[in-house]
Amino acid sequence: MKPLSKSFFKKSTNEVAKNLLGCYLVSKSKEGTTIGKIIETESYLYNDPASHSFNGKTIRNEAMFGLPGRAYIYFTYGMYFCFNVTTNKKGIGEAVLIRALEPIKGINLMKKRRNTDNLHQLCSGPAKLVIALGIKKEDYGLDLTKENSRVKIFSQIKEKKFEIIETKRIGISKGKELPHRFYIKGSKFISRK
DNA sequence: GGAACGATTGAT
DNA sequence: TCAATCGTTCCT
């Protein structure tokens, strides 16, 4: 396990979205540490009608236009938060939405936070994993590559042994046809089939 | 100032 | 299939 560097996030957003599969998202808090393996992502590009950045920079999406390797967190449907990682270079509004994790560590804490005992439903959706890992809106803009950050991402040292499925994204009304959703083939922890 | 909408989830 | 629930964005 080694922490991801800034250069990891500086690449094209679709590339980062695929490279993030199999990596480990680590969240430390007073309650304990939770870790999940990233098994599903979606990319949102600057010229993509489904992207929050499509109409230019605003207060909400400002992190998408900032440096790569930062947390872009947004509030949605009046009650949930979703977690993204910023990508590409500064000035280009792009990010990868983390859609699902396979719970690895701190599973009891995740169960408590999510108020369910069902392992397969702990992190099987973008808002679910934010709750399970205790990610807060205060983490907006956090540098995920910094040594002492509360939330970080690590890559596995072993060779990746899985196939990646590329398909259409979920829950959007525009840009429906773009194949910007990626997940590990055969994983039982994806958000939807 | 006002209104419509949404990168979701969980219950029915 | 549908309600919950409210910040963001866009229109007037």
Image (tube, coloured by chain):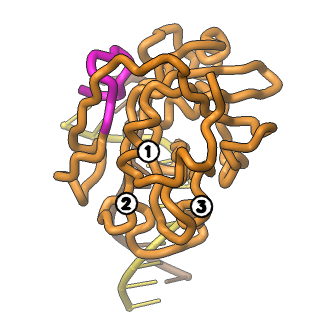
Chain colours: A orange, B brown, C yellow
Can residue A79 be seen at all in this image of the molecule? no
Q: Residues within 10 Å of mark 1 (few under 14, many from 20)?
A: many
Q: Report the quarter where the N terminus of chain A lies.
A: top right
- Residue A68 magenta: no
Task: Report how far apart the C-alphas of labels 2 and 1 lie in the structure.
Answer: 12 Å
Q: Report the quarter where the C terminus of chain A lies.
A: top left
User: Closer to the N terminus: mark 1 or mark 3?
Assistant: 1
- Taking depth in this image into account, of A60 and A85 the one nearest to the observer is A85
Place of residue A122 in the rendered image (x, y in percent of width and height, measured from the top left): 50, 19
Q: Which residue is mark 1?
A: A16
Type of secondary structure dominating the magenta stretch:
loop
- Amino acid beneath label 3: Ala
User: Residue A36 falls in which quadrant of the image?
Assistant: top right
Against A26, is A149 above or below?
Answer: below
Task: Report how far apart the C-alphas of labels 3 and 2 lie in the structure.
Answer: 14 Å
Q: Which residue is mark 3?
A: A63
Chain ID at mark 1: A
Place of residue C3 in the rendered image (x, y in percent of width and height, measured from the top left): 37, 41
Place of residue A21 in the rendered image (x, y in percent of width and height, measured from the top left): 42, 30
Against A188, is A59 above or below?
Answer: below
Q: Of discs 2 and 1, which sits in the foreground?
A: 1
